[in-house]
Image: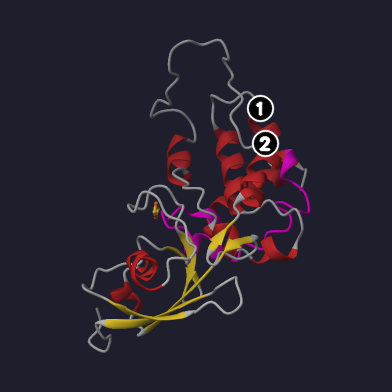
Amino acid sequence: MTESLATRITLEVDRSEPGKPSRFEVPVPAPTSRVLDALLYVREHLDPSLGFRYSCRAGMCGSCAVVVNGREALACQTSIGDLGTSTVRVSPLRALPVLRDVMCDLAPFFDTLKRAGAAIRPREPDRKTLRTMPPAEPHRAFIEGQNGCLTCGACFSACEWSATREGYLGPAAMNRVLMLSLDERDALGMSRLADVARDSGALRCHTLGNCSVVCPVGIPLREGMQKLKGLLATMDVA
Ligand code: FES
């Protein structure tokens, strides 16, 4: 915690219902106290109607993604001390409908995965044993680097096109399609890429990289998009 940060902060929360309080004085018991701890304090002691979502409190489920001081983050992993501000503003993810306060409806985000066809189609559908990916398999290292998405929606929120381009697939869905297209276990392979070579997909992405910056597990989404565009160019579909 920086020296200037008091042991209390002002927590500002976007409220969806007019007239509800949006500023709360919240104690910060330790430098490692998280934004989620502050939200829980408000709900427990000051306003039980405050709406937010969480589950694992360990950075694994992705359900607590919000915008903290203007940047997408997991509330359970964001240390108030690291923010270094005496006022902390929490807003809902962008480009998604707000259910209540900072809790969003993630259905449009999950729909991007469906629309991109981002589910494996097994090459050996009748196989009874687990098909692993040996170290020597081509693209294994790359796929491992792109893997681990929490489907928290942070990248979708941070991408400029999600809110402005209706039907835009977004970084998480296209990253998933890229991984599957390179995965030897998938029956569709590179033919998957034709589905994302459209104006609401890879052709719209400007690879600005906001998605990579906010990804809570550090997936290099921007690099993935560059690779995806490179593959599309060789397929002559872009
Ligand atoms: S509560 Fe699960 S990632 Fe934050």
Name the residue: 21% across, 73% down. Answer: 29
Name the residue: 42% across, 47% down. Answer: 61
**Where 137 sits versus 174, above or below?**
above
**Where 128 sits versus 138, above or below?**
above
Q: Mark 1 points at which residue?
A: 188
Q: Is residue 58 part of the magenta span, yes or no?
A: no
The picture places residue 47, in percent across and down from the top left corner, at 42, 71
How many numbered dots are placed on residues in this image? 2
In the displayed structure image, the side of residue 83 where residue 203 appears, left or right: right
Along the line of sight, the residue nearer the viewer: 95 or 98: 98
**Image quarter of the N terminus:** bottom left
Name the residue: 27% across, 69% down. Answer: 33
Q: What element carries label 2?
A: loop
- Tag 2 near tag 1, CB within 8 Å: yes
**Where 137 sits versus 31, above or below?**
above
Q: Which colour scheme is used?
A: secondary structure
What kind of residue is marked 1?
Answer: Leu
Along the line of sight, the residue nearer the viewer: 142 or 11: 11
Q: Earlier in the sequence, mark 2 or mark 1?
A: 2
Q: Name the residue under label 2.
A: 117
Overall secondary structure of the magenta stretch? loop
Residue range of the region highlighted in magenta in the rendering: 194-222
CA neighbours of label 2 inside 10 A, class few (<14), some (14 to 19), many (20+) = some
Tell me the tag on residue 227. none
Name the residue: 24% across, 82% down. Answer: 7
In the displayed structure image, the side of residue 8 where residue 107 appears, left or right: right
CA neighbours of label 1 inside 10 A, class few (<14), some (14 to 19), many (20+) = some
Q: Alpha-carbon distance for marks 2 and 1?
A: 10 Å
Q: What element carries label 1?
A: loop
